[in-house]
Amino acid sequence: MTRTKVALGVSSSIGLYKACEIVRGFQKAGVEVQVVMTPNAARLISPLLFSSLAGTKTIVEMFEEPAGRSIRHVALAREIALLCVAPATANVIGKFAGGVADDFLSTLFLATTAPVLIAPAMNEAMYLDRTTQANMDRLKALGAEFVEAEKGYLACGDAGWGRLAEPEAIVREGLRILARTSSLAGRTVLVTAGPTREHLDPVRFLSNPSSGKMGYELAREAVARGARTILVSGPTGLVPPAGAMTESVVSAAEMEKACLKAFPKAGIVVMAAAVSDFRFKEPRGRKSAKEEIGLSLAVERTPDILARLGRAKKPGQVLVGFAAETHDVAAHARRKMAAKKADLMVANAVGAGRGFGTETNEVLIIAPSGPVQAAGPLSKREIARLIFDRIEALLEKKRR
Ligand SMILES: Cc1cc2nc3c(=O)[nH]c(=O)nc-3n(C[C@H](O)[C@H](O)[C@H](O)COP(=O)(O)O)c2cc1C
């Protein structure tokens, strides 16, 4: 069996002396470490130190003759189960956030699909600077995780925010992420996302402002945890998540059909789509003139997919519903959960710049018993992570 490999990115912060302990921490847990230093970090300390500790030659240069046929950053990007960057300078964080790939570490960041853990370290003014904070927010929204810097004595002589977290905390978080990469291995997850469109004719339809972002992040998170992931998506302008099997649908009826097909295979079902509640009773195949249509159009209810799956649910399956409400959010969500036999309900307030189409979300996670978990505002990827943590806790409970 090949050992799990982590790439440890080391950039030019004084805090890099702590990276030696991080190498040791991962090694003690049986994880192989390949250190990648920025050229500036190699000016602060010799790469030989890390080569000796890790037992593999530290990578610094991008343009070095490769030992074999493979391109080093691409090969390493595929081999690693985690990219941990500690310490991460303001510069490295900015480069990651901006997609700059001008040295080995920043190129590796773009080339890898492995999870990324970043531990910033810098002077307080640089850490609290709005550009650095915005760069960190962007990286969080894109899926990177952080071990936040601490408050304490800094190398510049000041005391304040920006000190690298302790090596044990960084290693602990890294190991937690590594365990998570296979926590749903062998399971099938069905996620729905986006709005549905109920056409009156080829150019007019009933719909809602759902962007599909929450559902797509849920599908990404399911893939990241090793699940076979089926995403049934209404019309969105989003790029399908890599690794998920995405089926595009338009109407509620099409979404229902796709869900019923996938449902028997799925152990976990997360219904994040905003399915239109109504459709036109008499849709037309051709566009009619507005004078012909008149001012009153008959509508009927679309299928209630969540309720239907709730009735068909087997004991081992976990069903998660979403409730977007403008008022009395928790009460409405509880009622829906009971009526539709869902195991968890994720409720959020929508309207006036909240929920639909935004980059962040603020939700209540509600189970039939126990306290309501309030989360956010957080990036939709972070919310997706919390939802899957709850789902995994529920699976664990069902197993016992
Ligand atoms: C002694 C010394 C300590 C530094 N410490 C930090 C630091 O803790 N955090 C940081 O963001 N930059 C720090 N810098 C500045 C970075 O080294 C500088 O921005 C550099 O261009 C970053 O390059 P890199 O990100 O490729 O390693 C330090 C510079 C020096 C000379």
Image: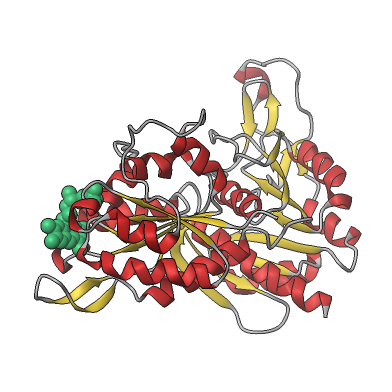
**Res. 163 in view:** yes
Image quadrant containing the C terminus = bottom right
Residue 313 is left or right of residue 57, and the answer is: right
Residue 34 is left or right of residue 267, and the answer is: left
Q: Residue at x 62, y 42 (%)?
A: 195
User: Residue 302 location in percent, x, y?
Assistant: 78, 44
Residue 47 is left or right of residue 216, and the answer is: left
Using the image as rendered, state which of residue 293 and residue 393 is in the foreground: 393
Where residue 340 sits, quadrant-wise, is bottom right
User: Residue 217 location in percent, x, y?
Assistant: 56, 50
Which residue is most to the left?
Answer: 157
Where residue 393 sits, quadrant-wise, is bottom right
User: Residue 116 location in percent, x, y?
Assistant: 46, 54
Using the image as rendered, state which of residue 378 and residue 57 is in the foreground: 57
Using the image as rendered, state which of residue 195 and residue 21 is in the foreground: 21
Please determine whether, in this image, residue 20 is positioned above or below residue 215.
below
Image quadrant containing the N terminus = bottom right
**Res. 352 in view:** no
Q: Which quarter of the rendered image does ligand 1 occupy?
A: bottom left
Where residue 252 sits, quadrant-wise, is top right
User: Residue 169 location in percent, x, y?
Assistant: 42, 75
Please determine whether, in this image, residue 397 is positioned above or below residue 143.
below
Q: Residue at x 69, y 67 (%)?
A: 391
Q: Residue at x 60, y 49 (%)?
A: 220
Using the image as rendered, state which of residue 44 and residue 275 is in the foreground: 44
